[in-house]
Image (cartoon, rainbow, N blue to C red):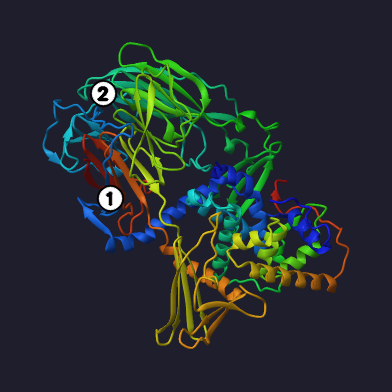
Amino acid sequence: MNTPTQFPDNDLERRLHDTLRGAQPGTGALHLIDVRRRASQRRRHRSLAVGVACAAATTVAVGGLALRSAPDARLVSGTDSVGQVDAATTGAADVSGSERLTGPPIAAPASNDAGQVVPWRDGFLSVNDTAGGIDARFSADGTSWVQVPFQRPGLGTFDRVVVAGDRLMVLEVESTEIAVNESWGIDRGRPVTVDAVHASWTADLVNWTTESLVLPSTDSQAPLRAQRTVTAFVATSQHWTVSVETRIDVDWDAVLPAEVPRDRAMDTIATEPTGVLVEYRDDAGTVVSTSYSWQQLGIEPPPAALATPPTTQHWASDIGASPVVEATASQPSIDPLASTVVADDRFVRLEAGRLIASANGVDWDVVAEAVDGRGLMPVPDGVVTFPLEGSPVRYRLADGSATELDIAGLPDTFSPLGNIAASTTVMVGDVDGETPPTGVLVEKDGLRFEGIADDRQQTYALTDIATGQVLVSETAPVVATADGAAVVFGPDDFEHLTAAGPEGAGESLVVLDPRTGEELTRLRAEELADGMVAWDGRQEATLDPPNLWVIASSNGIDWIAQQVDVDPPAGTQPVFGYLPDVAVQSGATVLLSVHGESSTIELP
Amino acid sequence: MLSFDDFFAETSGQMVRALGLALNDAHLGHDAAAEGFARALHDWNRVRRFANPTGWVYRVGLNWALSRRRRQRREVAADIFDEDLGAAILVESEVVDPQILTAIRGLSADHRAVVVGRYFFDWSEAQLALAMNIPPGTVKSRLSRALQLLAGRLAAHPSAHSSAHSGSNRKTAP
C-alpha cells in the first residue's frame, strides 16, 4: 500500500482518503479459522457438484472404488539423479517368509468404523475398536479378508496401532474429561486430556508386553486448563516414541456471563488483545457478535499462556526393558504433516527447516539443512518432502547424512494432506488443477455475448438467441504480462471485437459483423462487469473438479500417482470428510478405501 | 515466501473495511472478505504469485457479494442511502468526514468499488485495473465520474467536514 499522503493538492481526494481509511466496520474481525472453515466447505461443495459429471464421464469403477481412469493415473519410473538405479526395497512390508494369517473369509472391514489398517506380514491388518472389543481382520491382497483373534492389553482406551518391524504395537491412553465444554470451540463434544499412555507390543496379537508413562501434571490453574493429546506414536523395529501436545485454553463456560446462551452458541470464541469475541444466535436466530474484555471475564491481565502456541513433548523407549524417557523438552508444536515418521528403521522428523534423524528417539542428528518441505513421507531408504515450489524431493538416508535426489514425473503442485496411516508410504494430497476460467455472459437486444478465458486462450461468441445462430466467434491466445496478469477480451486481441465509444478506448466493446464490418452489438463496461458476475454465478457450481491424488512407491524410484474420486454415494454425507478412509501400502499393493468401498493398486 | 497466514494477518483487517465500504454493507463486506480469503487459501499456490494478491481477494470478494446480492434480489439502489446498511459502518477516527461517507454511500456499486480501491488501498489507476480486471480506461472513466458525482453531492449539501463521530455499534458487554 502506498503512503497515505499522496493527495496533497486535491481536497476532495484527500478527504476521501482520510475518511475511507478512518472508517471502521461495525463487524468483528475476520478470523483465520473461519476462512479455513469456509475454504473447507468450498472444497466440499465443489466435490459434490462435480461428482455427478465424473460418474458419467471420466471415472471407472475398480473393485467398487471410483478411481480416475487413464490418463489421470500416472506410472512414473525413474533412476536416482546421482546416476544409479536404486533397488533397495526394505520396509515394513518386506517380511517375506513370515506366517500368513488365515481363517474363514469375511467381508472387507467397514472403513467408516474409524478402524485402522496397517501393513502386516505381507498383507493388511485392519483393527477396529468396537463395543464388543477389537475387530481385527487380515487380508493378503486387500480384497479377501479373514477375522483374526486380537486381544488388546486393556490398560486404557484404545488409541492406535502401529507396526514395529515384525511386531505390532498398540497405544492405549488414560484420560480425564475436561469439564463442561460441550458448546464451545471447534472441538465440540466433550474433550479429554491425556494423563497416561501405555505402549504394548506383540508378535502374535494375543500376548503383550507393556511400558507405561504417567505424564507429569501441568501447572495450569483455573480458569485456565491444559488439554493434552497424543499427536504421534511411531516405532522402529527396536524403539518407539510418542508425542504429546499440550495446549492451554480458558474454561469458557466458567468465565463467560450467563447472558451468553450456551445452547445456541456458534463456533467462534476468538481471543484478541483486549478480550474475546463470542458469536452466538439470539432468540430471533440472528448471529450476535459480542465482545468481552478480559477484565469483564475476571481474567486481568490476560494470561501469557493464552498467547503461547501449543507445545509438544516427545517421549521414547525401546522395545525391551528400558524406562520411558523424555526425549525433548516442550517445544512449539510443528505441522503434523512434518511430525515423526520411520524410514530406514530410524525416526525422522522435519523441524525448523532441517531433517533430523534418530535411531532411538532420544539422540537426534541433523541429516539435512535448509529443507523446504511441508510434509514428510517415508520411503524404504529415506523420506520425501514436499516443497512449496516444485516437485517433491527425495532424501536417501545413509551414514548419518541425507542425499537429495530428484523425483521425476510427480505432479509439481502436489500438496500433501496427510499420511492416512502414519509411517506408511502412501501420501494423499491435493493437486492444483488448471486455473479456473473466467468468463462473461451478456444478453442484450436478442443477442448473447459469451466469452471464456483461461491461462492459455480466450474465446468469445455472439449468438442470435432466437435462432441459435452463431454470428461471430473468435479464439485468441492469452498473453500474460511480466507479472503474470493478463487482460482478456481486449480490443487488440481479436479481429472482429474492437473498442469504441465516446468515453475512450476500453470503455465499450463492439462486435463487428465479419462480412460487412457493421456493428452487431455494443457492450458497455458496466454491462461487461455485470456479465462477469452473471457468468460466475452460472458457473459457480461446476468449477474445479475435486483433485485428490495418492502417490506411492515401493522403492522411492518408481512411483504411481493416482487420482481418486472421493465423492460420497448419492444422497449421503461423508463420514470423515473427503480424504480416503484407508490409504496404506503393503509390499507392492496399495489399499485405498473411500466411503466404505475399497480398491487396490499394484505398484511397479 | 509469503505464507497465507502472514498474508491474511497483514491484510484481513483492511479487506473487511474496504469491502464493507465498497458494498455499503459491513456485514456483507465481512462475508465477502471471508469468501475472498477462502478462495485465495484454496488456490494459494497460484494467488500468491500474483503481483497484487490483495487486489485479487478484493475483486473476488466483490464479485461474490454482488452475485449473491443479485441472486437474493436485494440490490441496493445506486442512489439511495440505506440507513440500516449505512449504520453498519460507523466512524471512529477524528479525520473521518461523515458528509464524505454519506456521499460515497450514494454512489453505485461499481463507482464505490473503484473509489475504495483508489482512496482506501491507494492503488494507482493501472493497479486498480489489474486488481479488478477491467480496462484502465474504464477505471479512469469510473473514477472521473465518481469524483464528479461526489463533488456535486458535496456542493449541494455543504457542511463542515471536520466534525467527527465516535463510537461503535459493536456490541459490548454491559
Looking at the picture, tell me which residue is in the foreground, A317 or B146: B146
User: Do discs 2 and 1 share a chain?
Assistant: yes
Q: Is residue A390 above or below residue A341?
A: below
Residue sitting farthest toward the right: B160
- Residue A571 point in image, percent of width and height: 33, 59
Q: Chain of mark 2?
A: A
Q: The residue tagged with tag 1: helix, strand or loop?
A: loop
Around disc 2, counting alpha carbons within 10 Å, would you say few (fewer than 14), some (14 to 19), or many (20 or more)? many
Name above or below for residue A408 compared with residue A197. Answer: below
Q: Residue A25 occupies which quadrant of the picture? A: bottom right
Q: Which mark is residue A107?
A: none
Decide which of tag 2 and tag 1 comes sooner along the chain: 1
User: SS class of the residue under badge 2?
Assistant: loop
User: Which amino acid, by three-letter code, is at mark 1?
Assistant: Ala
**Looking at the figure, which quarter contains the N terminus of chain B?**
top right
Q: What x and y, as percent, mark residue A290?
A: 65, 48
Question: Residue A541's quadrant in the figure?
Answer: bottom left
Q: Amino acid at mark 2?
A: Gly
Residue A73: assigned label? 1
Residue at 57% of width from left, 55% of height from top? B57
